[in-house]
Image (cartoon, rainbow, N blue to C red):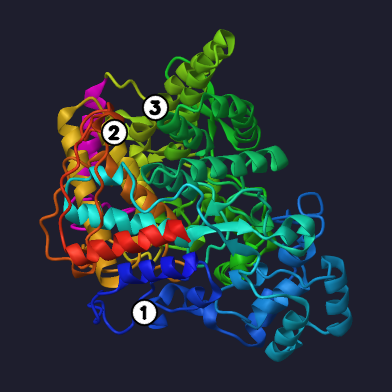
Amino acid sequence: MREFLFLLFIVSLVSGRPQKDPRGPNIIDETADFGTPEHDNRVHTELTQLPAIRSVFQTGPEIARLIGSDYFNGSVLPCDNETAPGQWMVYCSGRLLQAVMAVKLYPDSKTFVDQPMKVNQTGESIMEHFEKRFPKPIEQISKKEVAEFVDEFFDKEGNELDVCELPDWKPITEKLAQIKDDTYLAFAQRLHFIWIQLCRQMKPEVKEDPFRFSLIYVPYQFILPGGRFREFYYWDAYWIVKGLIASELYSTARMMILNFAHIIETYGFIPNGGRVYYLRRSQPPFFAPMVYEYYLATQDTQLVMDMIPVIEKEYIFWSQRRSVNITLETQEFNETVRMFQYHTEADTPRPESFREDVLSAEPFTTKSKKRAFFKDIGSAAESGWDFSSRWFKDHKNLTTIETTNIVPVDLNAFLCYNMNIMQFFYQLAGNPLKHMEWSSRLSNFRQDFTKVFYVPVRKGWYDYNLRTGSHNTDFFPSNAAPLFAQCYDPLNSQLAVDVYNQMENSGAFSMSGGIPTSMHKETNQQWDYPNGWSPLNHMIIEGLRKSLNPTLQQKAFVLAQKWLETNMQTFNVSNAMWEKYNVQEPQGKLATGGEYEVQAGFGWTNGAALDLIMTYSDRLEYKGPLLEGLVGTPPPRKSFSSSSSSSSSSTSESSSTITPSSTTGSSSKLLAIITVTIFYFLF
């Protein structure tokens, strides 16, 4: 009864959206069912709008022979008998995987490797059945035969997870009530409700019979990104946690942190995402920042004490398996410093994009060149930027990718941030020796960081290329990562001004919808112009806000307004949040490019938006066109004691108390919301 009434409440919130989508007939509205197969199979743009990936839709003997070639013998697999002893032969290697990709059984390569094996089946038994039934070459196996085999031995994807209830969720929160502007309040309230749709927990059988699943077990519930992403993801979670904190979902944020701690204790690091085929690569290291943000919001010192050894364990992974020596030549002497880079060991096609990787590697004529290409592809995926001209020699073509030759400024800034957090945590723990150890490590690293990445003539930090011994001084939001991570002397305010001016001179801040991921046009890569992503926009805004320069703090506010209005106006016409946006224009234009369709949900977009709204809750004022999808359902306000307020001030790191304004909008709609909310808690 309670769930039914609450569903009515959710339906009432999404009713009244515009009937006609101004983006045109190729866009399909998505309102709920995030993370379900039905959602994943929806198409938002015609294939003719995606010329760079059109080849993945080809089939036939030539394609099948190409996909069926030997990619595994002597290679480092994405998962193996050590990391995934019961699953690797199905999800990370083998002729079955190749056959599924050769006949293009599903539109999305990820679908098959997300399918669980049926009860009483094992990876070994399935492969024995496959080899016995299909001794012939891969190109001679028909799509019908493959489909029948998969139906016989595998369950449908997406069924390993249960929808869960958030134990700490409530319809009205103290923080949200402090948002002064009614339009932003309505938008924040909608985002607050999306958390309910994205909550998942593992079914018991994932723990009891783990070798049937590609899914990696975690003990607590978590928030999905949304869309085709039916598992947790690493760096997404930082912005999700930020959003959960804005929604006062502290218990849920804590559970996500505990899940990642479980993963680090099990594997020694956090993989890209929650599937065994991700076990050879990580993502940007945001575990320590998650714990830090949670501590700032809750003052939960005990969790910090529990997480300190876990954070150290992850740091060891990056130090031992993702670091590289760089020799810096000076007029007086040569100096060798150690920095970090993205560099997966795997040199085969990524299982979740197997077909795409094989076809992209077609121009390479030798096995060694193909393996190097696959390693660079996987390393770019480890960066989170899959893919971008940032990793390409010619800044245009995927086939020139050289991720393993690049020492990224943002990764090193993030690990600098980790060091800063660790010295603070040890101070909090009352351990002066470890505090001094990490403080010294941080100080030395900051000096080396400047030597490697700072280019005086360009007045900024830039990626370093090991092959050329030079820097890529083009604009990328990653150039601002040291501002976000504060991997510089904050008293040097001119440095932050110089970095801002360099980015502004590139034209990156002139877009009406936000900050693009590069200024390289027509690459058709999703991490390039004209696409803007929440984590990158958020990092630049936060980096400027954290500076001690009032002018830059005001610039941060202006950029935050621009990004939030893009989010709101697109939400108004699509009734959904998206993983990325076309920032050339603010009103409802979705991003394109890459290997898959733009996804709705969307965890980190929601989290970044909620965090920015709360950061500037006392200053934001919407003055744009009427947003019918928001104003039709004005959110409730609730009076709270001003003594318990913890909203952030817009121009400083300190907190300020804001008195919420009185309730506005339709009294009948508000009465309905309050009534259903009461029933929610009564039944």
| Residue 504 on the magenta span | yes
Q: Residues within 10 Å of mark 2 (few under 14, many from 20)?
A: some
Q: Which residue is mark 2?
A: 645
Q: Amino acid at mark 2?
A: Ser
Q: Is residue 388 above or below residue 46?
A: above
Q: Position of residue 569 (x, y in %)?
A: 22, 64
Q: Amino acid at mark 3?
A: Cys
Mark 2 or 3 closer to N-term?
A: 3
Q: Amino acid at mark 1?
A: Ile
Residue 214 in view of the camera:
yes
> Residue 28, labelled with which disc?
1
Q: Position of residue 606 (x, y in %)?
A: 37, 54
Q: Which residue is mark 3?
A: 487
Q: Is residue 357 above or below residue 537?
A: below
Q: Residues within 10 Å of mark 3 (few under 14, many from 20)?
A: many
* Quarter of the rendering containing residue 505: top left
Please state which of the two labelled residues, at mark 3 or mark 1, is closer to the viewer. 1
Instruction: State the extent of the magenta-drawn residues as a range.
Output: 492-519
What residue is at 48 percent from the left and 38 percent from the top?
Answer: 411
Identify which residue, 389 or 212, lies in the foreground: 212
Could you give the CA–CA distance between mark 3 and mark 1, rounded to whole angstroms? 43 Å
> Residue 458, labelled with which disc?
none
